[in-house]
Amino acid sequence: MSVDRKKQILDAAAKSFSLFGYKATTMDQVAKLANVGKGTIYNFFKNKEDLFHEIVSSLIAEMKEAAEQSFDEEDSFVEKVHRALYQVLDFRRKHQLTIKLFQEAREMGTPAVLEVMDKIERSILDYIRDKIEMGIKHGEIKNCNPEVTAFVILKTYISLIFDWERDHEPLEKDEIARLFDLYFFQGLSK
């Protein structure tokens, strides 16, 4: 029974954060959406921040799972990185909660939201770094600094998917893969 209540509360809180953002969500709203008393929420969570962090941790796990399911072990390193990154960024772009969090971070700079956005980015960077380390270990790519390489790869993907679209037509997935391959894996030198 208590697991059902906890899930009810988490679902209601996720809905509230997705609709209203972190700052505007109250424990009263969550209780109302979950159809429980406010005190019931405090049986499971210390405060709104604790509740928020649990939801974000689940979101990160979902993103990683989506990335892992996007490729086949037979794929080359380049294919794995591209598919996994595109899947994660597409997930971030389409998932209502992340859309609202990005909006709140940009417009209001809510400290709790900025902290969570950093946590999400750090998780993605760690994931990419791990894949790079495996690529180096298996001789699929040159020895490089995995931390710096993960950062450059992620920032480039974000730029090609989100920043480019502010002033241009969106790039197709295949075009992003081609550009990424050109700039990172082939290089511009003749």
Image: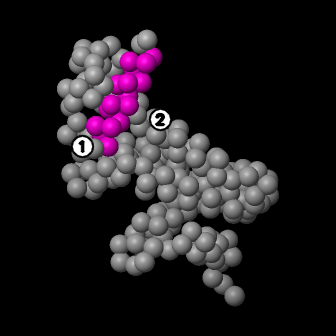
Q: Residue at x 35, y 72 (%)?
A: 166
Instruction: Please state the extent of the stretch shown in magenta in the rendering.
Output: 3-18
Q: CA distance from mark 2 to mark 1?
A: 19 Å
Q: Is residue 143 left or right of residue 155?
A: right
Q: Amino acid at mark 2?
A: Ser
Residue 119 lies in what quarter of the image? top left
Picture disc at residue 159: none
Quarter of the figure that contains the N terminus: top left
Residue 143 appears in view: no
Query: How crowded is the residue under tag 1: few (<14 C-alpha within 10 Å), some, or many (20+)?
Result: some
Q: Nearer the viewer, mark 2 or mark 1?
A: 1
Mark count: 2
State the image coordinates of residue 10 (x, y, percent, origin top left). 38, 28
Residue topped by disc 2: 58
Label 2 or label 1, whichever comes before in sequence order: 1
Q: Is residue 74 left or right of residue 114?
A: right
Residue topped by disc 1: 20
Residue 158 appears in view: yes
State the image coordinates of residue 108 (x, y, percent, origin top left). 21, 51
Residue 33 lies in what quarter of the image? top left
Q: Secondary structure at mark 1?
A: helix
Above/below status of 125 relative to 189: above
Q: Secondary structure at mark 2?
A: helix
